[in-house]
Amino acid sequence: MEPDPELEEFATKVFGLARAGETEVLCAYVDAGVPVNLRNDKGDTLVMLAAYHGHAATVRALTERGADPDLANDRGQTPLAGAVFKKEPEVVRALMDAGADPAAGTPSALDTARLFGSSDILGLLGPG
């Protein structure tokens, strides 16, 4: 089956909204039926892209709509580990509030925080 260019273009747009933190528009699409756990060709979810690019409000809005904060991409990376790597404390808080597991993924958010000596972010991850 040949890929549908219009569908690919639409998906690219939706993932771009997550990267840009365009919360209102992105959530309108999700509310209209775009899967909240939609993945791109690398396995990145909308939450992963929003988290990695520092958009805490977008992360919160997506997880409030049922997005799984622990879905790892094809490399085993979780949104929480990505937020720790990028040193985004507000995103870390948003993911922790949504129930993200700091021990999930490879490397985990805990391992990432330890590796980079991020004691302030390590404190946000709770006892570990």
Image (cartoon, rainbow, N blue to C red):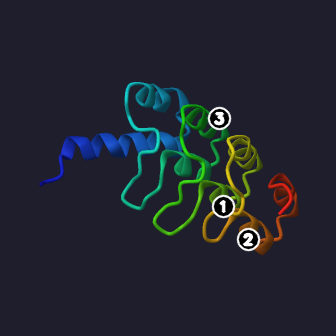
Of mark 3 and mark 1, the one earlier in the sequence is 3
Dot 3 surroundings within 10 Å: few (below 14), some, or many (20 or more)? Answer: some
Task: Point out the image quarter for the C terminus.
Answer: bottom right
Q: Distance between the residues labelled 3 and 1?
A: 18 Å
Tag 2's secondary structure? helix
Q: Which residue is drawn at 52% across and 26% down?
A: 24
Asked whether, in this view, residue 8 is left or right of residue 17, the answer is left
- Label 1 CA crowd tier, 10 Å (few <14, some 14–19, many 20+): many
Q: In this view, does 122 lie above or below 63?
A: below
Query: Residue 117, position in %: x, y?
Result: 83, 70
Q: Which of 49 and 71 is in front in this view?
A: 71
- Secondary element type, mark 1: helix
Which residue is the site of mark 3?
57
- What is the CA distance from the residue labelled 2 to the residue labelled 1? 8 Å
- Is 100 displayed left or right of 44 in the figure? right
Residue type marked 3: Ala
Q: Earlier in the sequence, mark 2 or mark 3?
A: 3
Between tags 3 and 1, which lies in front?
Answer: 1
Q: Which residue is drawn at 47% across and 32% down?
A: 26
Which one is nearer the viewer's eye here, 112 or 54?
A: 112
Task: Identify residue type, mark 2.
Answer: Asp
- Give me the C-alpha separation between circle 2 and circle 3: 25 Å
Task: Name the residue beneath numbered marker 1.
Answer: 81
102 horizontally vs 17: left or right: right
Which residue position is annotated with label 2? 111
